[in-house]
């Protein structure tokens, strides 16, 4: 088993005690308290304890702003962490605001061409994809790709990461074959550089499976999703959002195959995970309820499906607002369902 020295780095209780000790030992806005908040916030974030992570990140940000001012590595990193946290919770506008701020600060702290600047460009590109601004998203990722290749050459995990991001944009632009080839390239690089038991490799499996599904290659998609689910459960025995993503994705393949009862069962498993990790009012929880409605509709249970659509749509609207693309998609699907009634 892991030694106490190894275990204590990821022990929540130990980090909470460390923060309390720093607060007792020091007064006011001391960098040591800020560092302890950042460390604990990152652990909460990793554990999908998003409310607690946000509180610790915001406390750390206040401290580092007071101590160092806006232009510091700590402020940029905390803005990036908060941006990712907001994005995971479906708070896209808040995420965009924070990632723009992170990029501005990183550009002032470092020159263009720096690792952190490239990472901030990737984060911003991913959020532009969420808001449907595909050209802007691709420009950010292409800029990051050039920086990463300049820093590391072609065969590096960060190059693979940005290739995967670019493939997601290509998919949404309707360029499915190009997206699939790029996802496969990203996966191959990650397998060589990181091995298969890593979160980044798992993310590439999820993306490649989605690209296979988009091209109608359903057996290949299912194989990717099942491989990814197995790895996630091995490396994250606790419940995680990513496990929910794989469960939902497997359900979506079954739905495409006309196996609606199987799809419904997998969507329900994903919903349980999202409720436990993101909360019942999260955009992902609402989205998978709408997919469950589609499975009910496929089984001819139209009245029950309409009620499910209304339930899921209400959650999505509360989570991300009326203008988000996922809300439009659910409205369209519900209208088709009502036309069958």
Image (spheres, rainbow, N blue to C red):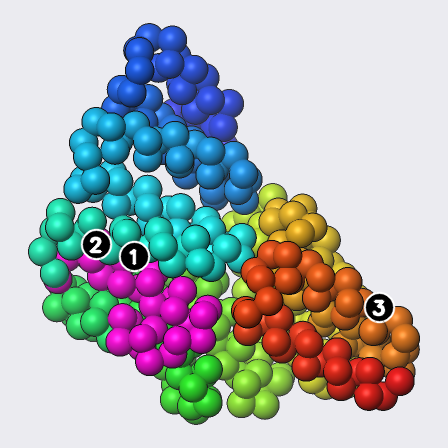
**Which residue corresponds to the image point at 21% horizontal and 40% vertical from the top-left?**
70
- Dot 2 crowding, Cα within 10 Å, few <14, some 14–19, many 20+: some
Q: Secondary structure at mark 3?
A: helix
Which percent across, then down, holds residue 129? 42, 72
**Which residue corresponds to the image point at 62% horizontal and 77% vertical from the top-left?**
329
Lower sequence index among marks 3 and 2: 2
Q: Is residue 35 left or right of residue 72?
A: right
Marks 3 and 2 sit apart, C-alpha to C-alpha, by: 45 Å
Q: Secondary structure at mark 2?
A: helix
- The numbered disc on residue 104 is 2
- Dot 3 crowding, Cα within 10 Å, few <14, some 14–19, many 20+: some
**Which residue corresponds to the image point at 65% horizontal and 48% vertical from the top-left?**
279
Give, as a single range, the part of the protein colored magenta: 113-141
In the image, residue 224 sits, relative to residue 235, either above or below, namely: below
Q: Is residue 39 something that shows in the picture?
A: no
Residue position for label 1:
100
Residue position for label 3:
307
Q: Residue 325 or 38: which is nearer the viewer?
A: 325
In the image, residue 74 sits, relative to residue 289, either above or below, namely: above
Q: Is residue 36 left or right of residue 259?
A: left
């Amino acid at each position: 088993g892991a030694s106490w020295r190894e275990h204590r780095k990821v022990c929540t209780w130990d980090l909470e005690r460390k923060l309390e000790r720093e607060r007792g030992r020091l007064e006011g806005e001391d960098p040591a308290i800020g560092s302890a908040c950042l460390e604990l916030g990152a652990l909460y974030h990793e554990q999908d304890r998003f409310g607690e992570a946000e509180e610790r990140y915001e406390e750390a940000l206040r401290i580092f702003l007071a101590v160092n001012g806006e232009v510091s590595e700590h402020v940029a990193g905390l803005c990036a962490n908060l941006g990712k946290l907001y994005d995971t919770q479906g708070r896209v506008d808040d995420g965009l605001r924070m990632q723009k701020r992170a990029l501005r600060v990183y550009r002032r702290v470092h020159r263009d061409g720096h690792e952190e600047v490239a990472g901030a460009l990737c984060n911003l590109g991913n959020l532009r994809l969420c808001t449907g601004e595909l050209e802007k998203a691709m420009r950010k990722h292409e800029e990051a790709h050039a920086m990463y290749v300049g820093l590391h050459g072609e065969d590096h995990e960060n190059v693979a990461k940005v290739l995967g991001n670019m493939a997601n944009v290509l998919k949404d632009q309707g360029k499915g074959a190009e997206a699939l080839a790029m996802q496969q390239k990203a996966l191959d690089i990650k397998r060589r550089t990181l091995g298969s038991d890593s979160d980044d490799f798992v993310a590439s499996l999820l993306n490649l499976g989605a690209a296979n599904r988009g091209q109608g290659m359903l057996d290949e998609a299912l194989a990717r999703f099942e491989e990814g689910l197995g790895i996630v459960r091995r490396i994250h025995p606790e419940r995680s959002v990513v496990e929910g993503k794989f469960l939902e994705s497997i359900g979506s393949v079954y739905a495409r195959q006309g196996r609606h009862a199987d799809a419904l069962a997998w969507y329900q498993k994903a919903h349980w995970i999202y409720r436990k990790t993101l909360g019942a009012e999260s955009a992902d929880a609402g989205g998978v309820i709408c997919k469950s409605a589609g499975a009910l509709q496929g089984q001819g249970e139209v009245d029950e499906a309409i009620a499910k659509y209304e339930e899921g749509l209400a959650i999505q609207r509360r989570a991300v607002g009326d203008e988000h693309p996922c809300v439009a998609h659910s409205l369209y699907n519900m209208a088709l369902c009502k036309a069958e009634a």
